[in-house]
Image (spheres, grey):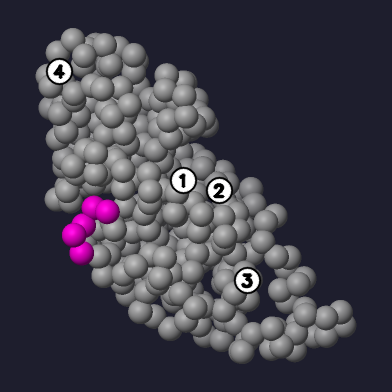
Amino acid sequence: MTGISRRSLLAAAAGLPCSAALAQSSPAVFPSRPITIVVPFPPGGATDLMARTIAQRFTSAWGQPVTIDNKPGAGGMLAAAHVAKAATDGHTLLFGATAQLAVNPSLYASVPYDVARDFAPIALVGSVPNILVSHPSVPLTRLADLIQAAKLEPGKLSYASPGSGSTAHLSMELFKGETGVDIVHVPYKGAAGGVNDILGNQVPLMIVSMPSVVNHVKAGRLVGLGVTDLRRSPALPNVPTFAELLPGFEATGWYGLVAPAKTSPTIVNMLNTEVLAALQDAEVRRAFETQGLRILGGTPDQFSSHIQSESRKWAAVITNARIKAN
């Protein structure tokens, strides 16, 4: 397991009681009161599921209740700004995603927080590939077929997404940039409307987070043309990846836990250790992977590097495709 060990976190010296050791390594015993994890999405989605799983682990480890505070709105910026201004004692955390931590600063003219300045990364929890699907009546069952059709008749084909600037939309714009095809974007306000319309054959194609359509693909109601991860998903092993046609292509949504900047490194490492322990649990892994979620993990520094890399990647796509938020 990455991160510092449980022993080094809870006992600063051999033979000392855990409470005394912790008092030496931190200004106060942590956690000293209930923890709040702020989620920038409504209850019930993939982000909420992962946050609640981590919350249960924290409660089991420390005996303190953990509250999930769902604060959707403004592309997740309300939640992120709230945590950016919170106390730096580790009791208010953000379960953020690609949008809040890597996309919004390039997508919006004004963002009420600075990712590098205002947050201390804790752990990268998991990722969810996007999947390009078609209605069964559409004579396109492979990405190669799509590319060929789009080049023969530029601008004729269209695809739906959950919204302008969503990771699904950015994934398809990255694909268009790498292949030179012209496919018209039809943004919806969320995944549900687009999924309903493609099931009703109102739109021919849609790119969306895998959990939104995985059961429809399994049932044959939709056809999976490709997933945007580097490897095939255990949830849909027969659906190829974009990378099988375009080596190195990766465009996933990801999720991770961050604290307000200047939170004690001791507290950050304690939180990291418990997140990684949760991700090693067999039941947690099975629940995530069934929905197409991939377990990640790693150190706070690795998460920081990931945020920086993804920020550069999506800033280039947004600039090149001239994307603006809805």
* Secondary structure category for the residue under label 2: loop
Residue drawn at x 33%, y 45% is 314
Q: Nearer the viewer, residue 44 or 307?
A: 307
Residue 250: where, in percent of width, then height? 43, 35
Query: Between 239 and 320, which is closer to the camera in this rendering?
Result: 320
The span from disc 2 to disc 4 (Cα, nearest Å) is: 38 Å
Q: Residues within 10 Å of mark 4 (few under 14, many from 20)?
A: some
Instruction: Give the residue pinned by disc 3.
Output: 270
**Is 269 on the left or on the right of 258, as rendered?**
right
Q: Amino acid at mark 2?
A: Leu
Report the Cα–Cα distance between label 2 and label 1. 7 Å
The mark nearer the N terminus, 3 or 1, is 1
State the residue position of label 2: 296
Is 99 on the left or on the right of 17, as rendered? left
Where is 92 relative to 29, above or below? above
C-alpha separation, residue under disc 3 versus residue under disc 2? 18 Å
Quadrant of the image occupied by residue 199: top left
**How many other residues sit within 10 Å of disc 3, few (<14), some (14-19) or many (≥20)?**
many
Mark 1 crowdedness (10 Å alpha carbons): few <14, some 14-19, many ≥20: many
Marks 4 & 1, CB-CB < 8 Å contact: no
Q: Circle 2: is it few (<14), some (14-19), or many (20+) Cα within 10 Å?
A: some
Marks 4/1: CA distance?
A: 32 Å
Type of amino acid at the residue the image marks with label 4: Pro
Most common secondary structure along the magenta stretch: loop
> Which stretch appears magenta?
106-110
Which marked residue is nearer to the observer: mark 4 or mark 1?
Answer: 4
Callout 2–callout 1 Cβ contact below 8 Å? yes
What amino acid type should be assigned to the residue bearing mark 1? Answer: Ser
Q: Is residue 63 left or right of residue 80?
A: right
Q: Earlier in the sequence, mark 3 or mark 4?
A: 4
Q: Position of residue 246 (x, y in %)?
A: 42, 22
Spot occupied by residue 232 in the image (x, y as percentages of width and height): 50, 28
